Amino acid sequence: MIENLKFQHSFNYAYIDEFTKKEIRRKTLKAVCIPGYQVPYSSPEMPISRGWGTGGLHLTLSLVGPDDVLKVIDQGSDASVNACNLRLFIKEMSNCAVTFDTAEATLIQTRHRVPEEILTEKQILVLQVPQPEVLRGVERHEAKTRIMHGEADYAKIWVTLYEAYVRSGTLRNGAGHPIMVNGRYVATPSPIPSWDVPNLNKARCLYLFGAGREKRIHCIPPFTRVEPLEFEDIRFKVEEFVGVRCSTSGQDKAFMDQVYADDLSSSYVINDSNFLDKLRKGPRPPQKLFTNPE
Amino acid sequence: MGYVAVKGGQDAIENAIKLVDYFRWKGRTKPIELDQARTQMRLAVDRAMGEGSLYAPEHAALALLQVEGDSFEAAFHLRAYRATLERRYDAEILNTREMFVHRRISSTFRDIPGGQILGPTRDYSFRLLNPALLNASLGSIEKFLSDLRDEIDPNKLHEMTTYKKVIDIFLKEGLMSSQARPGEDRRVFDVTREAIKFPVPRSATLQMLARAETGALMCMAYSTMRGFGMAHGTVGELRVGEVPVRVVDKRGRLRCVGKIKVSEAEMVGGSGHGQGEGGGRAAKKTGAPRYSIGYGLCFGQNETKAICMGMVESALRNPNSDNPANNQEFVLYHTEVIEGYGFTNHLKLPHYVTFQAGMEGARRVARKNSDKAEQVTVSAGGVEENND
Amino acid sequence: MSTLVTVQPYNQIFDGQKHYRTLLQCTARPGTIGQLDDALLNLPSQLNRATALLALALFSGDISYYLDENQAQAANFIRSETAAKPISAEQADFLILTDGNRLEGLQQAKPGTLSFPDQGATVVLQVSAISPAPLADSLRLTLTGPGIESETVVFVLGACEEFFATLRERNAEFPLGVDVFLTCDSLSAGPCVMALPRTTRVQWERI
């Protein structure tokens, strides 16, 4: 049916053409030089949907080489369909090795979680970011949020935090607690639970954040101060999971998923699939735990 | 949690793909050939090329077949393919004065130099379902074509190939200026190589609108003329036809690399009755020409898109925060087809971690606020979530 | 790198990828001395191999560069191998300073804007040697800042104090600033690179 050669193409190594890879690489380096600042980049279309991890994919594909060992997680799991899909795509395009083992991976792409196990100097964690602009909730125009960041004018977000406290009695609910990076830029940690936020502070690994649809890259270098926004008397807290243990491993002190049976009764399971696997087989992997202030 | 079955994700994906094929083929109908799709679904192909930002009719037809006619997906496939192509040359600026015109109309004047040419359009046909189409055969097609050929006067075939433009009338009378507005950013910007920064240069606006989703653009344009804007642009000229594309080769020679079909709309704004937007007002202050052009150009025959693009382009040159269509960030970000399509659909991805984080926060508040803390913790296990 | 490995012609995909990872590690961990796997290159004498490999990894037709003095051969190499465009020091995205004792380029390099500090330039300074151990007549650099656990000490030969004094001035108003790569060719380790992003505080001392 198709006779012409137009359809007989093959793709460049790691899918993205070298010209665009260089551009993404230059922007990534600038992101490392200005921790927490959002660098605009070209963000070419990928063969997966916008909002499904294209920013992470751009970063991963600009980084990956045949010697890499790749891990992809979505919502803490190596096995969720989108993680499988991305892992297969990156592997097919780059001929890298793949793993579920957090410690073995050189490159980890993740959505909405930082692994429980402590990451090392040899590892890069690429986080998928839906909305990189932490101020978008208080200022809808990009031109204005740029100026606010430029002038370190964060009054509006502090007010919002305080108002949330007055309304609900807690600093903020939910994922993506805003962070101050290196004492200068307020940034989003991506929608990770508060549980994961302390892991960003003075970590040994490099954190790269890719927002494909919004065309922004930001970064937290290793050993960089990352403070969740909080007031002196109203402190940031992580999820507590009061009186909860993992129904599979019997362990606690990890972020939990609540799972429901057909009769609507619920139990908890440790969310990080590889961490859970390791807990079931052997000693507890090294972990950085945060204690909530009183 | 059914779709997170441990290590079963890959199987699920493979099965999902099989099922898509099953639903395509289960009726056991003859496969549609690429050429059939390309020629008989011409307007769908044109639209996919425009939104896919890739002039490649065969690829567009393949995309449409592959995705069972979904216009969002077809554009998406073309964009993803386009992003892998090496760009060897930048084309010279298209000169639509050289267009081999298929169709050309103006609503600003009763008659225009060269004449109005209705060309291929459904504008003046009744929208009645036509069962006769079901009886078409290769024989009837041949007969139709030979009858049509007989109607043509061969002497007139090559009489006129290009036409002057309607805006020439405005320019000649000094009612319109070909000069840039003072302070206008005239850089040529490529939104596929660089993220846009606000305020965006006009070239970036035009590029983004030319790639925008037709329906989204129509929504914006429509809003400018009913309730959320005071514009009622007039079609200065709408043309559909073929334009040569030229590049400068490595030895510096100008070479024609082929022709592409485009729709072009020049929407005249700033009317003489003072009801228009910026053009009219600016005129009072400066004595400058009173009319301005909102420009629309897109691949293939997609007149709705070209006209709406012209209207929106005109609106964007007159910022006004009261009206969505006059707001650059609002229009340019939200008419982008691949991004809107992807992000709205990403809601299908699991969000249980973020959701759990939110629930834990809510429970903390509940514990704090309630004297009966224990009771809340117990009920949180099973009752609260029924609301979701 | 074992010296027994035969040096291969430059491969833009795989060498580019490896070198980028080294540059990224170095930028993320200032003071880290990164070794770039060597490749066969027909280099003009003014460029060291590390600078050339950095340019091949990062430069393309959509960026501009400045090269100190009129280094026609070096400029030709960069233009023909990367398609990057030569431009004045004030406008350049990348500045290649072949002589660690000259400062013009650094003084003029663009620092970016408050809204877009990423438009600040990247300066590539060629030096004679970078070492974790003391070198005779070198500058001892003590580095602190993001990417560094407590502090890192490195020794640099072939750069002047004024360079680091000027760099400190240029980077005084974070987020505005310029980011620096030091490059050298080492007999033992081959082409080497070290990064000093604008966040790094540098103290120097002649030893």
Image (cartoon, rainbow, N blue to C red):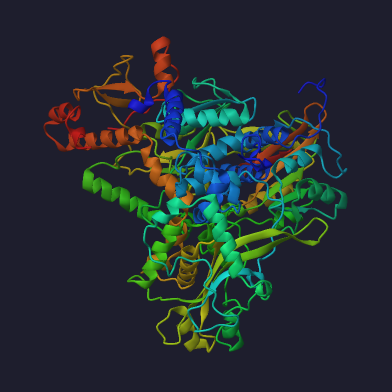
B210 or A128: which is nearer to us?
A: B210
Give the x, y percent position of residue A17.
65, 42
Residue B300 visible within the image: no
B127 or A13: which is nearer to us?
A: B127
Answer above or below: position of B348 versus B111: above
Residue C73 visible within the image: yes
Tell whether C41 sits left or right of A65. Answer: right
Answer above or below: position of A140 versus C82: below
Residue C185, quarter of the rendered image: top right
Q: How many marks?
A: 0
Q: Residue lying furthest top in this view?
A: A282
Identify the residue shown where x is 83% and y is 24%: C6
Residue C20, quarter of the rendered image: top right
**Quarter of the figure that contains the C terminus of chain C:** top right
Give the x, y percent position of residue B36.
54, 48
B34 or B49: which is nearer to us?
A: B34
Answer above or below: position of B252 versus C124: below
Identify the residue shown where x is 77% and y is 27%: C189
Identify the residue shown where x is 44% and y is 17%: A285
Give the x, y percent position of residue B122.
45, 65
